[in-house]
Image: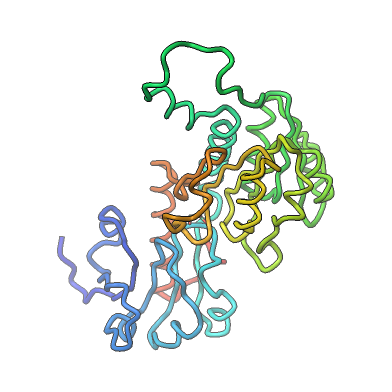
Amino acid sequence: MTSATTPVPIMGDGLPPVLREMLGPDIEILEWDESPQSPSLARAVGVLTFGHPRVDGPLMDRMPNLKVISNHGVGVDHIDVAAARERKIPVGNTPGCLDASTADMTMALLLATARNVVVGDQFARSAEFTHYDPAQLIGYEVSGSTLGIVGLGRIGRQVARRARAFDMRVLYHNRNRDTEAERDLGVEYAAFDDLLKQSDFVALNCPLTPETTNLIGTRELGLMKPTGILLNMARGAVVDHDALFAALNSRRIAGAGLDVTNPEPLPRNHPLLSLTNIVITPHLGSASNRTRHRMMQMTVENLQAGLKSSPLPWAV
Ligand code: DGY
């Protein structure tokens, strides 16, 4: 199909064909180019962030025609939202549609770390697996254990529901108590340190903000049980990686499941990658077919609204 109008130029990073198709012929996708002579920056009327490129005030200032920034995903820590607001550029994101799939992935990491799914898979493929040995690869019981959720927001609540179905006791920590969630989900509020001390699994489901940067460091890992497992589904920078390596390497805590790291990916020689008591996935929280499709639809709708100078359906 050809368009009768001149396509509106937007800058996008690594957009897959399906998203390009959804954007349609009325949009011209410019190469993500931040070089000094970038023709994209001069022309872009919109920005679509797909793979977390950093968009800050100075970059926005190089885009004189910019009307909207539409982010594929809910977390916008890679975008300077305050700078966009100062420049009256609306920022859109995709809240809500990815809560269930991110919670599913939290449970996947929880089960994988607790029950040796990854090392078990490697062992089962190896020549060392010669016979069934009931003494091998004994994991931690999930049912009946305690999960502490740091950040009982939309995703955290979905994690709580799933954990309750696994007969887990669920603690949560938020800035404020959520008595409605306590009633509806059967979760219990805990002060941050108490949550760390009492939980068998600590799941980080909070956004990355100045307050949550390096929230988990040596002191916090030191409060966890020696059998405790840390799960990070938030952002890598919520956890101090040096402290985490020390805690895992010394078996101060039993294990960790990370869907996110800082940086992402970790350098191939990063010490965390040498450990066997950690499972790392490449930022798969919302990577399921239906969720990704909906995220793309919302991203496109936000972009289209911004290009028309209309209010964004999902504005940050
Ligand atoms: C999110 O939605 O924030 C996910 O991390 C994907 O960007």
Relative depth, front residue between 277 and 61: 277
In the rendered view, does 106 fall on the left or right side of 60?
right
Horizontal and vertical percent position of residue 129: 42, 18
Relative depth, front residue between 227 and 237: 227
Give the residue displayed 21% in from the left and 74% down from the top: 5
In the rendered view, does 34 fall on the left or right side of 39?
right
Asked if 72 appears above or below 169 in the picture, the reply is below
Horizontal and vertical percent position of residue 166: 66, 25
Q: What is the count of numbered marks?
A: 0
| Colour pattern of the rendering | rainbow
Asked if 297 appears above or below 127 in the picture, the reply is below
Assign the C terminus to one quadrant of the image.
Answer: bottom right
Assign the N terminus to one quadrant of the image.
Answer: bottom left
In the rendered view, does 165 fall on the left or right side of 9?
right
Q: Which quarter of the picture shows residue 135?
A: top right
Give the residue displayed 21% in from the left and 76% down from the top: 6
Horizontal and vertical percent position of residue 144: 73, 24
Q: Which quarter of the picture shows residue 306?
A: bottom left
Give the residue displayed 52% in from the left and 12% down from the top: 133
Asked if 264 appears above or below 97 in the picture, the reply is below
Give the residue displayed 77% in from the left and 37% down from the top: 187
Extreme-left residue of the structure = 2
Relative depth, front residue between 57 and 184: 57
Horizontal and vertical percent position of residue 69: 45, 72
